[in-house]
Image (spheres, coloured by chain):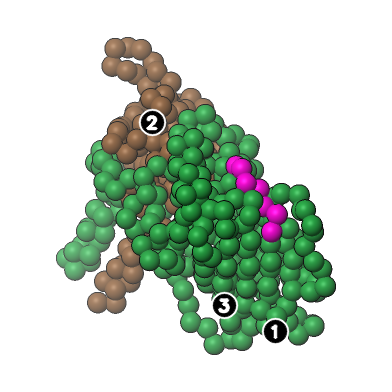
Chain colours: A green, B brown
Amino acid sequence: MSSRLAAVWIPLALLLGSSPVLGQGDNGLTAVDVKSTKPAPRTADGHPDLSGYWKGTTDTKPGGNIGKDLPGFKLPLTPAGEAALQHNLTATIDPESLCIIGGIPRHNASGLPFEVLQGARKVAFLYWYSYFRLIPIDARRKHSEDPDPSFFGEELGRWEGDTLVIDSIGFKDEKVWIDENANPHSDALHVVERWTRPDADHIHVETLIEDSKFYTRPITYSRTWVAGKADEELQEYSCSENNVDKDHLGFGPGPIRPDGTRGYLDPAPLPPPLPRPVK
Amino acid sequence: MKLRIAIFAAVVGLTAGWPLLAHHSFAAEFDGSKAMRLTGALSKIEWTNPHTYFYLDVNDGSGNIVKWTCEAGSPGALSRRGFKKSDLKLGDTIVVDGYLAKDGSHLIDARRVTLPDGRILSGASAGDGGPGQ
């Protein structure tokens, strides 16, 4: 090895060798954003085709936080919402870790890729953990008077020009976190997602989140994903196969860092890596 | 120079923009102040979702064998970073660096796994907000 090469590789090896997440990388689950000049494909009926395997971008921060687009990530909680948040933080285990569906809008804030399969009258969103939602696309359909509460809600799709609008009501009010930071939502939740495909390599959502019980005003959340590789697709993931840790989990997500992500601010370092044996 | 740029880009790619995907927060289960190292014989492997588990027989220094559970990422997460089930063999002595469970049980987060041949692999649950993310 030349001295120039050594000067580069040795610090690199030390950096990776000392990292507690050696080799973690993006695991192929997120991707660096790309520029695209290719137009969005269209279906036979002329609508943009949202179908594809979509991955979050590495510059979407903070991930998992529905307050991502708000100043200081501060959600406008009502007193009832604040009480619900405190309940989630101190008396509930993350429902997703108990293999309960994350629902909407939580799945839109997730770091996991998802797949869209679009038909003329229905669109399917397929998620990790083997969850899905199947949304009718029919502007004539109206919400039910009293829909059965569900994690994705009663979802109705319609086209407004090149935008697929999904309007959802009828959500659960228990065993739900609206994001990974344990923020709450009530059964008054109303979500309007406006999905577009600005070009072949991106899908984008503008989300309006209304919940007058828990939030003093509507919240907006927007995000763009990039297209995965042609051979990437969802894999089997049976969340309840061997959920050993459900008996060891504490309440809430733990501390939230100033950057809006969950986790300890200053964890203890791991013991130093062992030297590789000399061959 | 091109080499340096390429390596810098690789490092940035490895250390920036961790995905959020773990099915629970690291801090909901593990104590970030209690980093530790276990060295023991691999007695059982569960290559399962939502987590992979390694079970180690660890000598507590007094001649007693203590059984420890080491929690790692999902099989998909591990295999995408090159950590395959075939890397582990029952009876192997492996070293696991991680963090103790908050409930004090013999459970650690297998953040870093050192195999008998010296290879170091990440067992971290990607995107759980744990150290390094």
Q: Is residue B13 visible?
A: no
Instruction: Chain letter for mark 3, please.
Output: A
> Is the residue marked by circle 3 packed among few (<14), some (14-19), or many (20+) residues within 10 Å?
many
| Residue positioned 24% across, 77% down in the render | B1
- Badge 2 vs badge 1, beta-carbon distance below 8 Å: no
- Badge 3 vs badge 2, beta-carbon distance below 8 Å: no
Residue A31: x and y in percent read 48, 67
Q: Is residue A76 above or below residue B3?
A: above
Are the residues under badges 3 and 1 in a single subunit?
yes
| Residue positioned 22% across, 65% down in the render | A8
Name the foreground residue: A177 vs B24.
A177
Residue A172 within the magenta-colored segment of the rendering: yes
Residue B89: x and y in percent read 49, 33
Nearer to us of marks 3 and 2 is: 2
N-terminal of the pair, mark 3 or mark 1, is 1
| Residue positioned 67% across, 82% down in the render | A162
Residue B102 badge: 2
- The N terminus of chain A is located in which quarter? bottom left
Q: Which residue is mark 1?
A: A161
Residue A204 within the magenta-colored segment of the rendering: no
Amino acid type for the residue under numbered disc 2: Lys
Name the foreground residue: A74 vs A24.
A74
Magenta span? A169-175
Residue B74: x and y in percent read 53, 44
Residue A149 badge: none
Mark 2: secondary structure:
loop
Q: Which residue is mark 3?
A: A201
Cα–Cα gap, marks 3 and 1? 20 Å
